[in-house]
Amino acid sequence: MRIGDSVGFNWEVEQAFIHLNHRQILFCFPEGSIGFQHLKENYQQYIQKPLPKNSKNALFLWFDDNNNPILLSPNNNSEIKWYSSPSTILTKMLEPIFEWNKNIIDT
């Protein structure tokens, strides 16, 4: 979900946390730390665990098996180099999600 500020988005977040496994929810921060702060200020009540104090330049927020929030950032992956293409950066950042989904499909 791309973080937004509307009645419709508020409803989507509420429904996602009611009907989905937390691991199925991925938040995207379009404005970096501003988007993260908006999520933290407006949606913490739906998230079972406390969010980190700041986003540390993360572009995405996902959840582990224990509903702990995980910030996904290019800085988290040592395989991402300064010369990497945007698609490589995105793929490497989202690798934990791809791996989790692969494990679900394989079982």
Image (cartoon, rainbow, N blue to C red):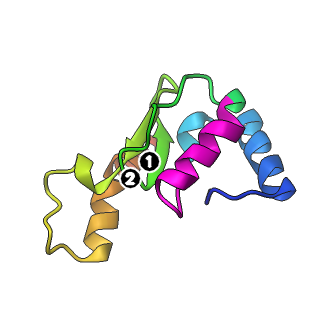
Q: Let me know if residue 28 appears in the view.
A: no
Q: Nearer the viewer, residue 107 or 75?
A: 75
Q: Residue at x 63, y 47 (%)?
A: 38
| Magenta portion: prevailing SS class | helix
Across and down, in percent, residue 69 comes to 48, 33
Q: Depth check: 19 or 107 in front?
A: 19
Q: Amino acid at mark 2?
A: Phe
Q: Is 43 one of the magenta-colored residues?
A: yes
User: Could you say whether the residue bearing mark 2 is in a helix, strand or loop?
Assistant: helix
**In the displayed structure, would residue 86 be above or below residue 81?**
below
Task: Let me know if residue 67 is in the magenta part.
Answer: no
Residue beneath the point at 69% across and 59% down: 4
Residue designated by label 2: 98
Residue type at tag 1: Asn
Residue 101 x/y as whole percent: 44, 48
The tally of labels here is 2
- Distance between the alpha carbons at the discs numbered 1 and 2: 5 Å
Residue 56 x %, y %? 36, 45
Q: Is residue 47 above or below residue 92?
A: above
Secondary structure type for disc 1: helix
Query: What's drawn in magenta, residue-wise?
Result: 29-44
Relative horizontal placement of residue 27, taking residue 65 as reference (left or right): right
Q: Mark 1 highlights which residue?
A: 101
Q: Nearer the viewer, residue 52 or 25?
A: 52
Q: Are marks 1 and 2 in contact (CB under 8 Å)?
A: yes
48 to the left or right of 12: left
Neighbour class for label 2 at 10 Å: few (<14), some, many (≥20)? few
Residue at 63% in and 30% down: 47
Mark 1 nearby-residue class (10 Å; few <14, some 14–19, many ≥20): few
> Which disc, if any, is residue 30?
none
Quarter holding the N terminus is bottom right
